[in-house]
Amino acid sequence: MGKIIAIASQKGGVGKTTTCLNLAVSLAGLGKNILLVDCDPQGALAAASNLKRITDTGLVQLLKGELEEGDIVVPAGWRSLALVGCGVQETDDVFFLERETANGNLGKAIRALSVGYDYILLDTQAGLSRGLFQLFSDVDSVLLPCTCKATTVKTLPLFLKFIQQARQSKNLTLQLEGVVITLYNEFDPCAVEVSETIQEAFPQEIFFRTFIPLLLSFEQASMRAIPVALLKRDTFAVLAYDRLAFELTERQKRGEVSGE
Ligand SMILES: Nc1ncnc2c1ncn2[C@@H]1O[C@H](COP(=O)(O)OP(=O)(O)O)[C@@H](O)[C@H]1O
Ligand SMILES: [Mg+2]
């Protein structure tokens, strides 16, 4: 069974969906078998990866018993990568998926789907919700994308505490895969200051050494609903997620992923 990693943050717009998709592509480039699961009822991952054009079905239909696992897993068409959409078609589906997340059925269904993959990356909705807390029962680790804004200094501790409480009450083996700094502009003095402040405030090992730079290519790839690797223009952008993927696998080999 593969490692299930939830890409999560209480904040929107921090690069969760972008990280999920591009990290998956880079991990697949390292020869890993990857399943991407869109747990966000807004279907951001499905939209970002062109999945909506291929299928509108996914987790909702699986959880309703209308479709089987094999019906909802869609090969991405590049590398050893497959995707599962959220399957939200109607407003009621949003509430249904939220209920199924909060009562634990979604987590169990994802565990069942994870067989045969090296990594299962979950794109999640922003927020400190009961559903996310419950979902942490069935994941192995949490990867937290984090932008360097003034509010980050306040919000990061709260989210780390949220993970810690989920570990204590739901899943004693839950790990913090790491915090990755995203949309980073090294020429913005405020971003540099926030980055230094948070790195001083927490143990160094919780941070990935790789920073994901703020680059127009990510926005362009997102507008075309493709991973940045398929833009074939900005090797700098592609390399950022390749580095993150390499670092993630190396950290796992060295057992550096934090449990405390
Ligand atoms: N490194 C980056 N550089 C520039 N734009 C980015 C970067 N990462 C993400 N974006 C853009 O920022 C917006 C929010 O990213 P997204 O991944 O959707 O965040 P979230 O899933 O946390 O809400 C999107 O328009 C995306 O294209
Ligand atoms: Mg998103």
Image (cartoon, rainbow, N blue to C red):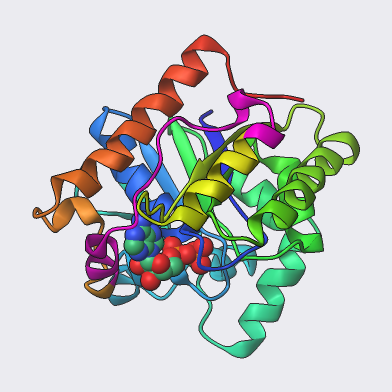
Drawn side of residue 255 relative to residue 240, left or right: right
Drawn side of residue 200 relative to residue 42, left or right: right
Residue at 74 percent across and 43 percent down: it is 160
Locate residue 90, reporting x and y percent.
56, 88
Say above or below: 221 vs 109: below
Q: Nearer the viewer, residue 59 or 205?
A: 205
Q: Is residue 247 magenta?
A: no
> Is residue 248 visible to the viewer in this orientation of the structure?
yes
Say above or below: 258 vs 229: above
Say above or below: 235 vs 72: above
Say above or below: 160 vs 67: above
Q: Nearer the viewer, residue 248 or 72?
A: 248
> Is residue 142 visible to the viewer in this orientation of the structure?
no
Residue at 60 percent across and 25 percent down: it is 204
Q: Nearer the viewer, residue 163 or 97?
A: 163
Q: Residue furthest right?
A: 169
Residue span colored magenta: 200-222
Quarter of the C terminus within the rendering: top right
Drawn side of residue 221 relative to residue 108, left or right: left
Residue at 51 percent across and 10 percent down: it is 254
Q: Residue furthest left?
A: 233
Q: Nearer the viewer, residue 7 or 211?
A: 211
Q: Is residue 215 magenta?
A: yes
Locate residue 23, reporting x and y percent.
37, 43
